[in-house]
């Protein structure tokens, strides 16, 4: 790989240190280089033939909440979609049924990456570690390896999803990893677009709407943090719009919903729409911070402690919302077409309440899964 790429596009150890990147990135780079080098000949041979069409894309993390929406939207718009899927007991048959090509690969297995990139023009990277997985292994070492392979395989565009204001919270491990990955991608020389996201409507359903419908415990905090949640379908629309315009090249864009909501407001809205009272347990942000301090001292609980680090974000009582006028204009998105959280929840509860009536159930029925 070092011989295949221009010297200016290779990140040296010194450069990585200057950008605050740790030894795990250098280890990932050393692993990725020999693997990608095997396919440099394939890339060179392809360069002498027909160019890779712009409609050829690969989605990494295509089975997730956001990834599947991007796959579906891209297929609807006529893209040739390839999805990198880890070997699993439950195959992603729904992706094949939609018309996508599924290839097996794993960000934790660098040797599986280069072959999946042959004939790909654009990578859309929306993968992230699951709760039971080591965050750094996937969200840092895996991303470094993927970017290195993208360089070697001459990928023309790389879309990466990050977190809003991640650079302001270096003490939160996942946000710090996102910041480092942003810097690494920006320094790689790849044409890229970075989207910083605030939060998804779909998370509100799982955390608040469903527990209230099932008459189960709802967990909240006493912070005043407000989040402008956005629908993953709108994020998918913005993503595909970024592929159609060069104005999005090498840009970092924030995507947020039209209005920011506190946890208390969301619970009250769900109660009103469900015509039911929630069993709310409020956990002070200080308790979460104390729990994290205890778990950090236990090696076996390190990943759990890292996830509790988001208490640092809650204690700031910030508003996770960004002005979107310039972004909508750049991507040619009509602002009125973006779904707000209130509209999304009204539609969700209308659909669910109709189902409840059809089965003769009440809103306090337990074990009502959707």
Image (cartoon, rainbow, N blue to C red):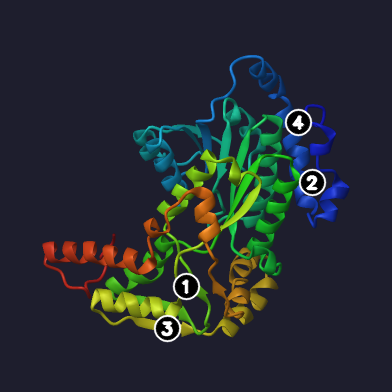
- The residue carrying mark 2 is 26
Q: Foreground: 15 or 130?
A: 15
Determine whether, in the image, residue 367 is placed left or right of residue 228: left
Image height check: is 273 above or below 205?
A: below
Residue 260 is tagged as 1
Determine whether, in the image, residue 272 is placed left or right of residue 73: left
Q: CA distance from mark 1 to mark 3?
A: 22 Å
The answer to which image quadrant residue 112 occupies is top right
Say what secondary structure mark 4 lies in: helix
Residue 34 is tagged as 4
| Count of marks, rendered view | 4
- The residue carrying mark 3 is 281
Image height check: is 51 above or below 196?
A: above
Please tell me which of labels 2 and 1 falls first in the chain: 2
Please tell me which of labels 1 and 3 falls first in the chain: 1
The residue carrying pointer 2 sits among few (fewer than 14), some (14 to 19) or many (20 or more) residues within 10 Å by Cα, namely some
Please tell me which of labels 4 and 3 falls first in the chain: 4
The answer to which image quadrant residue 165 occupies is bottom right
For the residues carrying marks 2 and 1, which lies nearer the camera in this image?
1
Determine whether, in the image, residue 131 is placed left or right of residue 95: right
Say what secondary structure mark 1 lies in: loop
Q: CA distance from mark 4 to mark 1?
A: 47 Å
Say what secondary structure mark 3 lies in: strand
Q: Residue at x 37, y 37 (%)?
A: 76
Can the viewer see residue 86 in this picture? no
Q: Residue at x 74, y 27 (%)?
A: 37
Can the viewer see residue 16 in this picture? yes
Q: CA distance from mark 4 to mark 3?
A: 52 Å
The image position of residue 253, as x and y in percent, is 59, 55
Q: CA distance from mark 4 to mark 2?
A: 13 Å
The image position of residue 233, as x and y in percent, is 41, 52
Q: Residue at x 75, y 34 (%)?
A: 33
């Amino acid at each position: 790989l070092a011989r295949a790429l221009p010297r200016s596009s290779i990140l040296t150890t010194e450069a990585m240190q200057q950008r605050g990147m740790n030894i795990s990135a250098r280890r990932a780079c050393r692993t990725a280089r020999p693997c990608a080098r095997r396919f440099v000949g394939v890339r060179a041979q392809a360069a002498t033939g027909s160019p890779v069409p712009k409609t050829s894309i690969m989605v990494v993390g295509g089975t997730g909440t956001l990834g599947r929406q991007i796959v579906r939207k891209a297929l609807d718009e006529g893209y040739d979609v390839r999805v990198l899927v880890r070997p699993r007991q439950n195959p992603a048959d729904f992706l094949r049924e939609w018309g996508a090509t599924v290839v097996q690969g794993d960000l934790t297995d660098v040797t599986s990456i280069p072959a999946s990139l042959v004939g790909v023009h654009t990578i859309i990277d929306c993968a992230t570690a699951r709760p039971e997985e080591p965050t750094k292994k996937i969200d840092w070492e895996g991303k470094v390896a993927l970017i290195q392979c993208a360089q070697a395989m001459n990928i023309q565009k790389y879309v990466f999803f990050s977190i809003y204001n991640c650079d302001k919270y270096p003490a939160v491990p996942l946000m710090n990893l996102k910041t480092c990955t942003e810097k690494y991608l920006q320094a790689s020389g790849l044409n890229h677009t970075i989207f910083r996201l605030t939060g998804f409507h779909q998370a509100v359903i799982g955390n608040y709407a469903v527990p209230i419908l099932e008459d189960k415990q709802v967990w909240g905090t006493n912070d005043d943090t407000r989040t402008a949640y956005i629908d993953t379908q709108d994020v998918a629309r913005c993503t595909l719009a970024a592929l159609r315009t060069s104005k999005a090249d090498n840009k970092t864009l924030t995507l947020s919903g039209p209005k920011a909501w506190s946890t208390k407001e969301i619970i009250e809205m769900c109660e009103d729409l469900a015509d039911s009272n929630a069993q709310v347990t409020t956990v002070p942000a200080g308790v979460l911070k104390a729990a994290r301090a205890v778990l950090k001292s236990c090696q076996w609980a390190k990943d759990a402690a890292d996830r509790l680090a988001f208490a640092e974000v809650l204690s700031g009582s910030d508003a996770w919302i960004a002005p979107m006028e310039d972004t909508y204009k750049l991507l040619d998105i009509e602002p009125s077409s973006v779904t707000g959280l209130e509209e999304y929840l009204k539609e969700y509860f209308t659909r669910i309440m109709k189902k409840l009536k059809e089965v003769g159930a009440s809103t306090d029925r337990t074990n009502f899964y959707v």
